[in-house]
Amino acid sequence: MISQVFILSSKGDHLIYKDFRGEAGSDVVSIFYEKVTALTGDQPPVVMVTPHKREQHSHKDLHFVHVRQGGLYWVATTTANSSPFTVIEFLNRLTALIKDYCGSLSEKSVQMNFALIYELLDEVVDYGYVQTTSSDVLKNFIQTEAVSSRPFSLFDLSNIGLFGAETQQSKVAPSSAATRPIQSSREQGGKSEIFVDVIERMSVVIGSNGVLMKADVEGEIRVKCYMPSCSEMRIGLNEEFSIGKSQLRGYGAAVRVDECSFHQAVRLDEFDSHRILRLSPSQGEQTVMQYQLSDDLPSAPPFRLFPTIERDSGGRLLMYMKLRCDLPPKRSLNVDCCCYCGFSLSQELSSPDQSAELRPQSRAVVWQIPRFPGGTQLSALFKLEVPGLSSASMLEVGPVGLSFELPKITATGLQIRFLRLTPVQPSPSQRWVRYVTHSDSYTIRI
Amino acid sequence: MMNDSLFSLVCAGEIFELKAELNSDKKEKKKEAVKKVIASMTVGKDVSALFPDVVNCMQTDNLELKKLVYLYLMNYAKSQPDMAIMAVNTFVKDCEDPNPLIRALAVRTMGCIRVDKITEYLCEPLRKCLKDEDPYVRKTAAVCVAKLHDINAQLVEDQGFLDTLKDLISDSNPMVVANAVAALSEIAESHPNSNLLDLNPQTINKLLTALNECTEWGQIFILDCLANYTPRDDRESQSICERVTPRLSHANSAVVLSAVKVLMKFMEMLPKDLDYYGTLLKKLAPPLVTLLSAEPELQYVALRNINLIVQRRPEILKHEMKVFFVKYNDPIYVKLEKLDIMIRLASQANIAQVLAELKEYATEVDVDFVRKAVRAIGRCAIKVEQSAERCVSTLLDLIQTKVNYVVQEAIVVIKDIFRKYPNKYESVIATLCENLDSLDEPEARAAMIWIVGEYAERIDNADELLESFLEGFHDESTQVQLQLLTAIVKLFLKKPTETQELVQQVLSLATQDSDNPDLRDRGYIYWRLLSTDPVAAKEVVLAEKPLISEETDLIEPTLLEELICHIGTLASVYHKPPSAFVEGSRGVQHKRLPGSAGSGESVESPDTGSAAGVSEAPPAVIPSQGDLLGDLLNLDLTPPTTTGPPPPSSGMQMGAMDLLGGGLDSLMGAGFGAPPAAMPASFTAPVSGGLDDLFDLGGGVGMPMGAYSPPKTVWLPAMKAKGLEISGTFARRAGVIQMEMTLTNKAMSVMTDFAIQFNRNSFGLAPAGPLQVLTPLSPNQSIEVTLPLNTVGPVMKMEPLNNLQVTDVHIYLYHKSHYYLHSRQVFLATWKDIPNDNESQFQIKDCHLNSDAASNKLQGSNIFTIAKRTVEGQDMLYQSMKLTNGIWVLAELRVQAGNPNYTISLKCRAPEVSQCVFQSYEAVLKN
């Protein structure tokens, strides 16, 4: 059971405070802020117990559960042995809901929409029990209108953006198109649009001998809907899509995942036969499907590193790195390459727009490559001053981590075949499909 | 942070303005004004002065405005109860409104106003709303009953709301069912004995039906409620499991975890040979793995839970090792949890992979993580024997990096590896010795000293190495000092000729210059041992050590069972029972896993059921006091199986300690100073009679013949010395100081082999002849012993002279073969070893002792308490005894405070004796 919910700005200002059960006073807000700012770096921020001796409400232990999103602290307190899992899930849903309703998550949008947020909280939680977080249900109850922090204009749509859309030939939506309050589509006659995002996160470990040791992909299909009158949506996946190791479909290269879970609103009656997800999307954003694949990626990992480490005569450590990108030549990416080691540095890079710096607190050399064309190879030479260089120092040069974002690519090969809406929408409806693969943890060991 | 008081000053004028706006005629203006009020309220300004004006806005048909006003009311009604009454009429009217939204809103808000006067008016509207035609109103009303119950429980009962709430469980709308279940669960928690949530197969069926239809959050309430149900048989539990399993693929991870909880609990009921059991095990793995792809916060909670699940049922995740490999961008708290689980899952099949990973981790940047990784390598070596060699060579590689903290951690774990595999990897000692100078942490220094002492004969310059530590002896931590003392004694016993001086030096440092009682005592023991009987000393100090086991950090089985019942909750994150952090009545009920259908005892009482669960738990572990290392270090002096006084150095040798502690301390009045912490307090109660007598003696030494000799007093009551009672006095007869004692055997068996030893004391008292106890002492026999004393013993000045806190006389008692000294580990291993079929359970009725008294009483009958735990007011005593014919019996005695009935589980290789043992328990406890 949730006792209180409050939202704090990063500076500790109270943006929202709602007490559901009268078990503790509002002084806990400052207690929380003191505690959370006293934490040094990476301590489990999930659950904390306040000491017994507090001024007024000293009779009960309080447990704080918080998440950070949009630069804000979203905090719930509880006194009973309730489930932190439920609370974290709830807080995540709450942020999503408020993002849907207010358009974006920021201190400003929360401040401007406080009345709306209080109204939402009142419907979403009753006496600490979560009632619903579905925007479909909530739209029946919510009266307050969102105040958009940035006026949304249709003119934005004509701008050229970055994301390609497979279903509409050459039209491209601006990147801001998906950050507006859902209600505006209803009240202000906003454009009815639907965004389907396929987002994959890739974690790869390549051993020091170049062997791929681990390659996992976690993916999800997210639907963001600004369509008031859509009764059903059908999302077609690759027909050769298969789940689990045993099951193989068709003849071609199967798109395979290990596990798959669906949003409860998804109806799967056509899934087994035709790989079609049917759902009635509610307003706002929801994750329709989540899936995972370990170890058996259909394609080679996009980056390879060939490091050589040696000692030169002057007692320095030379790191010569060759980084190869195996993506199709047309792509060009922004890549950060981060190598753990703890020494001072001089460098030679293959192109002037790249940069490298040593970050002493994380003991890492960061090599930034703003444009990395596919199918090419870049190299860098780092000379490291090592006090008391010995053969053991070589062991201290730690793994290399890459971070990047691959638009228009899914590592599993999952594609959206089609996106159909029924009843057929009146003309100005637009459907967008976007693919992106992030590096979650791309590690190359040396 | 804002300064609240400053703010309220500043906005005094603002309040006036707001007042005007609130009373404006225009609806829009009113709304904006209320919004402003609420905005001020949020940032902590006091706007309670506006109460009447805001309440005036309440009567409106604008829902948005109404909601805002209600929001204000909820916040301030409590501080202004009189004015809150003004709102009641509107509330009551709103509860009749044709719009269900308004009806629900009114009843919801009214419940949140925690003012007694208002609750009176709430009853009627609430009754109507509970039967409302609209499910939205009904579900709100259901929660409102819980709110009202919190304010005034009696009122709720009197008004019959609880029955209405129970009816709502059968409601057609799943959301109403879910809220009714949630409300009832909460109310039931404050009435532990009521059967409010009368779970029977019919209601369970209703809940399961609602489960499929309600929202994800409702599913959580229902699953949590299901988890409290105990199915009647395995068939019912299977059918529930089947209906819960689909929840495992839910997108909401809280639903998944609640479903896991239900399944983990009901699985206990399923026979293991059932096909469905295997299927279920397989189905549990994927959702758990999926949880690890969530946000780091959720991952952390998931990992803490998986840690419990892995301990309870390792087979679920045994093939999923890879998902627990650490990602370099995981937050540190996730990394550490993953590492822990990796070691739990390590087995021969995957050890190579695990080791390769750990080696990588050991070169990472984060110090804490690296340390834990190095330690993990050592734990792998101990857990998987086949990998030990590879682990050792990995550790040696790491030592070569010369990174200070890596080296120190490596040395600490290598010591454990030596303990597990003696005489196997000693070749690495040379490498370790090279790093001696870089060690600055006590733990690493102690470990290194232990290694040097243990393998002194193979290290040429062992004496030099140890001597170098001795220089700064007093600056070392206790851990290092104790270790150094032991190591030098070991060295002396191995190479007596060259190291005499060294051992003298350390003994005098430890006994004379130290303020630490542990150190002093250990020093004395060694000194005495060495000076009286070097052969015995060798047998004691260099005795064979029991092997360490890898399972030291497991959660003890009963706690684990309870935590499994709390999967997904805070308890599972803290790994503590809810009673440890939730105060009041809530959540204090003790949850237990249901007994297995396969075991003989049916579930007649909750205790029986859980005992069956205990015996089934695969690795039963009694918790170790400190961490693994503390234990290992202390273990270097093992409980002797030989005769001879064991040194009081280790918390593990509880049995041995009893003898010494009980015997000596009661005689001398805490003669040994502070006992080691692990020693049960009951053994150290001083007997003041001893003190006085000795003091008298001090006065009497120089007095003429025929001086007063105090009557004998009991120095050592029988119940503290395994049945041997000693009473005695000191007297001077014919110019010879004599110690006159009466030894009485109050135990059931024969005692033999008595000996006495005097410590150094202020008067130089020492026995002039050996203690003459010729005959074996049979039960209930008494014997008079007179021991002539002289004063030629070594004199050591004690300050103050008559303070018998100072060690003076020690009597060592030992009798063989009546009982055995168990360490916890031995107990545990034996308990595990004995098949479950041999366990039998009895009830001892009408016994009004508390657990300590019972333990003492039993000890009088040679039944020794090896460990004691207290779980939720229930004391568990783990006891052992050895019958004279050589049969071992292990027992677990549960004593609940205030309950005269004890439950005892006996485990024994010869189950036929259990009945007799039980009878003797009963006899002992009741007399």
Image (tube, coloured by chain):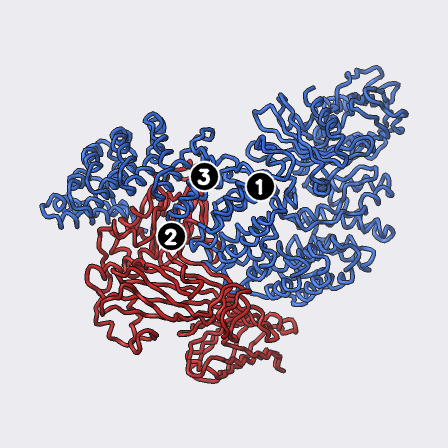
Q: Which residue is mark 2?
A: A91
Disc 3 residue type (three-letter): Ile
Residue drawn at x 42%, y 66% is A274
Q: Residue furthest front?
A: A273
Q: Secondary structure at mark 1?
A: loop
Along the line of sight, which residue is nearer the eye, B245 or B738? B245
Label 2 chain ID? A
Dot placed on the residue nearer the N-terminal end, 3 or 1:
3
Residue B159 placement: quadrant: top left
Q: Are marks 3 and 1 on the same chain?
A: yes
From mark 1 to mark 2, how far is it between C-alphas?
35 Å
Residue B167's place in the image compared with A64, above or below, is: above
Q: Which residue is mark 3?
A: B204
Regarding residue B46, the answer to whether it shows in the image is no
Q: Which residue is mark 1?
A: B269
Q: Secondary structure at mark 3?
A: helix
Q: Residue furthest left?
A: B25
Q: Position of residue A142 (x, y in %)?
A: 25, 51
Disc 2 residue type (three-letter): Leu
Q: Position of residue B786 (x, y in %)?
A: 86, 22
Q: Which chain is red?
A: A
Q: Which chain is blue?
A: B
Residue B642 placement: quadrant: top right
Tell me the crowding category of disc 3: few under 14, some 14 to 19, or many 20 or more residues within 10 angstroms, Cα based.
some
Tell me the crowding category of disc 1: few under 14, some 14 to 19, or many 20 or more residues within 10 angstroms, Cα based.
many
Mark seen at residue B300: none
Q: Are marks 2 and 3 on the same chain?
A: no
From mark 3 to mark 1, how far is it between C-alphas?
17 Å
